[in-house]
Image (cartoon, rainbow, N blue to C red):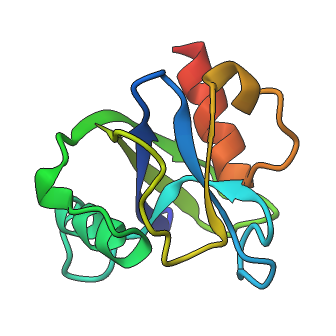
């Protein structure tokens, strides 16, 4: 059986349609200094929904209970040279009014249109894959 790691991701969407991304710190273990999507690994004995709420609380000052969160997509990124396991992503979305929330993990929040995101060369590998997946669908 293939070893798979589960992750949750959440796209925070602004009223103007831009998507809020997280600028990772320069010393981050993955994607240092790059733009990524808020979220993280599902821990042992944790449901995907529990993980998503925990990650929102750990990474931002947003209250997950006050957000209208919905599942956008699920997909698997196969193991590759930058990550040894298949990664099963659960991609969620939620509307936020602005970027005036605190970011506890990373250097801050940046907002871009989907078209602008797909032109950037400073995305984490998983963010590139995620946005190319979204763009195709």
Q: Name the residue rendered at 59%, 38% in the picture.
A: 130
Horizontally, residue 33 falls left or right of residue 64, namely right
On the image, the x and y values in percent for residue 51 come to: 27, 68
Q: Where is residue 57, by image quadrant?
A: bottom left
Q: Name the residue rendered at 76%, 49% in the picture.
A: 123
Foreground residue among 20 and 71: 20
Question: What residue occupies the far front of the structure in this picture?
Answer: 100
Question: What residue occupies the far top of the structure in this picture?
Answer: 137
Q: Name the residue rendered at 68%, 69% in the picture.
A: 84
Q: Name the residue rendered at 26%, 37% in the picture.
A: 71
Q: Where is residue 98, by image quadrant?
A: top left
Question: What residue occupies the far left of the structure in this picture?
Answer: 65
Horizontally, residue 128 falls left or right of residue 4, namely right
Q: Where is residue 69, by image quadrant?
A: top left
On the image, the x and y values in percent for residue 2 come to: 50, 62
Seen in the picture, residue 126 relative to 32 is either above or below; the reply is above
Seen in the picture, residue 64 relative to 18 is either above or below; the reply is below
Figure disc tally: 0
Question: What residue occupies the far right of the structure in this picture?
Answer: 121
On the image, the x and y values in percent for residue 86 come to: 56, 58
Seen in the picture, residue 133 relative to 56 is either above or below; the reply is above
On the image, the x and y values in percent for residue 29 come to: 71, 82
Foreground residue among 43 and 109: 109
Foreground residue among 35 and 133: 35
Q: Point out the image quarter for the N terminus.
A: bottom left
């Amino acid at each position: 059986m293939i070893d798979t790691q589960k992750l949750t991701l959440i796209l925070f969407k602004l009223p103007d349609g831009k998507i809020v991304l997280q600028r990772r710190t320069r010393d981050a273990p993955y994607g240092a200094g790059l733009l990524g999507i808020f979220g993280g690994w599902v821990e042992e004995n944790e449901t995907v929904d529990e993980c998503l709420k925990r990650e929102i609380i750990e990474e931002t000052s947003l209250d997950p209970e006050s957000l209208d969160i919905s599942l956008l997509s699920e997909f698997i990124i196969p193991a590759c040279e930058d990550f040894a396991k298949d990664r099963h992503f659960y991609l969620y979305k939620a509307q936020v009014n602005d970027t005036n929330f605190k970011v506890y993990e990373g250097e801050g929040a940046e907002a871009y249109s989907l078209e602008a995101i797909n032109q950037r060369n400073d995305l984490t590998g998983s963010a590139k894959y995620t946005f190319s997946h979204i763009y195709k669908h």
